[in-house]
Image (cartoon, rainbow, N blue to C red):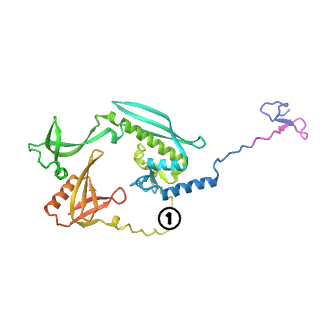
């Protein structure tokens, strides 16, 4: 007897005798049909995308809720924590830390790994989660930029406090050395290991939490159509995920004419008087702001350029300078690149 059953059992429930074949058996039981549910409807997905787009146009502010990615060629914006919170509020999502891990890296260094879940608080339904990590071995936390200095034999000028910015632009300032204030001359900045690494533990924890929250929001709401995550925070990524792809065959259409940038972005030279130079320490670096009579300000990290701006403006306050500038990292800001 020829059987078409792997079990070779003529009494198996999946088989019956074929009247046309005598005792030969054939398969008779139908196979089940698998049904896949899509969850959200197409209309709902379209509506969700429209809501995010409306939120960008009416509520979110560039520079506060999202920013740009300089140098990657991507049109997508970086979603910031405050922007993620606005999107979460719109969709009634409540974040909650569901898992956290601290990895000791030795010599006081730590890595924080956090998972944040999102729940729809009117229904209590879980909608997604995101992960984020941060380590004290990241450059911005591991090192400190300190200025080399040399103690001079000069007395501290009587107007040192009132003219702090003036003296700092010239490379001098007050510093407490061995318990007493002395007049010093600053040299080049140097990078050194952060001796108080425990001071940034909480900062790193908050950064890991922020990265997890942004990651969760992007994946749970579909906001990744409009935003990406800060590339500086994606360890070792350096923008590779956002580089434009190269088509296999270049388009033969003529390139569209370039749009003229706004007048301020197009300008490379300012012809104005300099009325002052301010300085501020940011993330261990000195940033100098050159103020022009027209009300505009151009920043620079060059102490030499800041010294030149201050010296020339004080020697000849009525002189009109030609300042070379370029657009800064944020809209409406400018960086000073030259002065004559």
Q: In the displayed structure, would residue 253 be above or below residue 331?
A: below
Give the percent coordinates (x, y) of residue 100: 47, 34
Q: Which residue appears at 44% of the width and 56% of the height?
A: 61
| Predominant secondary structure, magenta span | loop
Name the quadrant containing residue 293: bottom left
Q: Is residue 14 above or below residue 270?
A: above
Give the residue pinned by disc 1: 251
* Residue count near mark 1 (Cα–Cα under 10 Å), binned few <14, some 14–19, many ≥20: few
Q: At 20% from the left edge and 51% from the top edge, which residue is drawn? A: 165
Quadrant of the drawing holding the N terminus:
top right
The one of 278 and 122 positioned closer to us in this rendering: 122
137 left or right of 163?
right
Q: Is residue 31 magenta?
A: yes
**Residue 70: x, y in percent?**
39, 54
Q: Secondary structure at mark 1?
A: loop
Screen quadrant of the C terminus: bottom left
Extent of the magenta region:
17-32
In the rendered image, residue 295, in percent from the top left (x then y), is placed at 27, 63
Asked whether, in this view, residue 9 is left or right of residue 185, the answer is right
Looking at this view, is 279 or 20 the one in front?
279
């Amino acid at each position: 007897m020829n059987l078409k059953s792997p079990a070779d059992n003529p009494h198996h429930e999946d088989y019956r005798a074929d009247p046309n074949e005598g005792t030969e058996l054939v398969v008779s039981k139908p196979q089940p049909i698998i049904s896949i549910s899509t969850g959200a409807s197409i209309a709902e997905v379209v509506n969700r995308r429209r809501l995010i787009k409306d939120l960008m146009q009416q509520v979110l502010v560039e520079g506060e809720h999202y920013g740009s990615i300089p140098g990657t060629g991507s049109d997508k914006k970086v979603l910031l924590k405050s922007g993620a919170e606005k999107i979460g509020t719109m969709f009634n999502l409540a974040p909650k830390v569901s898992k956290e891990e601290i990895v000791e890296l030795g010599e006081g260094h730590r890595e924080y790994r956090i998972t944040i879940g999102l729940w729809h608080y009117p229904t209590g339904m879980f909608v997604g989660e995101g992960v984020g990590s941060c380590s004290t071995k990241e450059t911005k936390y591991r090192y400190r930029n300190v200025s080399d200095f040399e103690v001079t034999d000069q007395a501290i000028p009587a107007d040192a406090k009132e003219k702090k910015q003036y003296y700092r632009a010239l490379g001098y300032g007050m510093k407490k050395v061995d318990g007493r204030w002395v007049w010093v001359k600053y040299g080049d900045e140097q990078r050194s290991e952060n001796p108080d690494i425990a001071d940034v533990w909480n900062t790193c924890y908050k950064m890991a939490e922020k990265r997890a929250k942004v990651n969760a929001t992007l994946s749970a709401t579909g906001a990744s159509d409009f935003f990406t995550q800060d590339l500086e925070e994606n360890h070792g990524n350096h923008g590779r995920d956002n580089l434009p792809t190269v088509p296999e065959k270049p388009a033969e259409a003529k390139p569209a004419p370039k749009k003229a940038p706004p007048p301020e972005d197009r300008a490379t030279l300012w012809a104005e008087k300099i009325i002052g130079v301010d300085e501020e320490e940011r993330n261990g670096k000195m940033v100098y702001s050159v103020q022009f009579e027209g009300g505009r300000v151009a920043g620079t990290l060059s102490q030499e350029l800041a010294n030149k701006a201050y010296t020339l403006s004080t020697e000849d306050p009525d002189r009109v300078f030609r300042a070379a500038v370029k657009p800064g990292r944020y809209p409406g800001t400018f960086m000073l690149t030259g002065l004559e």
